[in-house]
Image: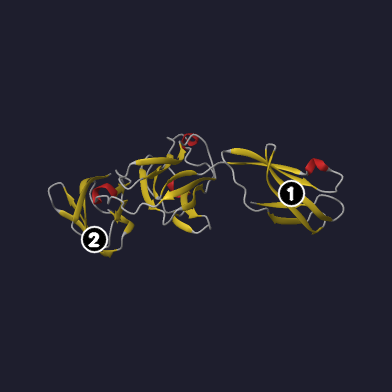
Amino acid sequence: MSVDMMNLGVTNLQYCTIAVMDGATELLSYDWSGDLDTYGVANVDLGTATFDSDTNFTIEITSGDDNTANNNSSGSVALATSGTSLIHIEIMIDSWPQEIGWSITDASGAVVQQVNIGEIAGEAEDVIEWWVNAPSEGCYTFMIEDSYGDGINGSAWGVNDGYCTVKSYDDNLTFVSSIYDYDGSYQFESEAAGMAVTSVNTGIQELSLNEVTKVFPNPFSDQTTLQFSLNQASNSSMTVRNLIGQQIMNLDFGTLQAGEHNRVLDFSGITAGVYLISLNAGEETTTMRVTLK
């Protein structure tokens, strides 16, 4: 834990004691010395404080100044939710999905996985999912951001609210714990939730291609996005046929590595109607029905 301390006195601050208090219990105490002039700021590393539950805490400074009214500050701490390394993110977007981005970072701040603002596309009420497997036990932070500052609070603009959930699952894809749950009822610029990974999933049940393939938006005009995830590197391709079996489009993606992939499909100039998109990856094939408006 660290604090930024500003000297609001008219003389230089040369020493003080900084204490972190949980009620009447002292968690940390640090004797600082230096030469901090008026309005000068010093960052002080106090060490590690351990909290047993969600709580409010205060930071109290004892010094030789004549104004003790500004020697206290308060804060709060929320304990991270414990879970396994397999994390599922689900977002139902509003009419402005390009404003939303999210990331998962480890305790050092290194990015484990992220979707940048501007990368999510689709139409209102499309549901988009991601699976992330954290590499090791430890503390992680999920953060969701909205570049406009209104979250997925669509009702403020006359459309339905979206939502975002982040959950932990075990090797058998059984729910373990809820890390973050936002129902779209309020606005935000960014929100964060901590998670403590206490076990790493090493025998994760592989999801079938059908379970990890989506097309959004659907219905759509001109363009849509094919999103899919591969358990292992695979030769992949896609065909589009109409309902009488005529091939409309054929794309060879070549060999794709394991992980998530997105491909924008351009239907410009194709007659409106219902089509079948077939994705082939290795020995698996899945087919989805889509509507071009």
Q: Is residue 94 visible?
A: no
Mark 2: which secondary structure? strand
Q: Residues within 10 Å of mark 2 (few under 14, many from 20)?
A: many
In the picture provided, is 76 more to the left or to the right than 168?
right
In the displayed structure, would residue 209 be above or below residue 23?
below
Where's residue 152, x and y in %? Answer: 47, 40
Q: Earlier in the sequence, mark 1 or mark 2?
A: 1
- What residue sits right under mark 1 in the picture? 18
In the picture provided, is 286 more to the left or to the right than 30?
left
81 or 285, which lies in front? 81
Q: Amino acid at mark 2?
A: Ser
Q: Residue furthest toward the left? A: 244
Mark 1: which secondary structure? strand
In the image, which disc is placed on residue 236? Answer: 2
In the displayed structure, would residue 198 be above or below residue 155?
below
Q: Residues within 10 Å of mark 1 (few under 14, many from 20)?
A: many
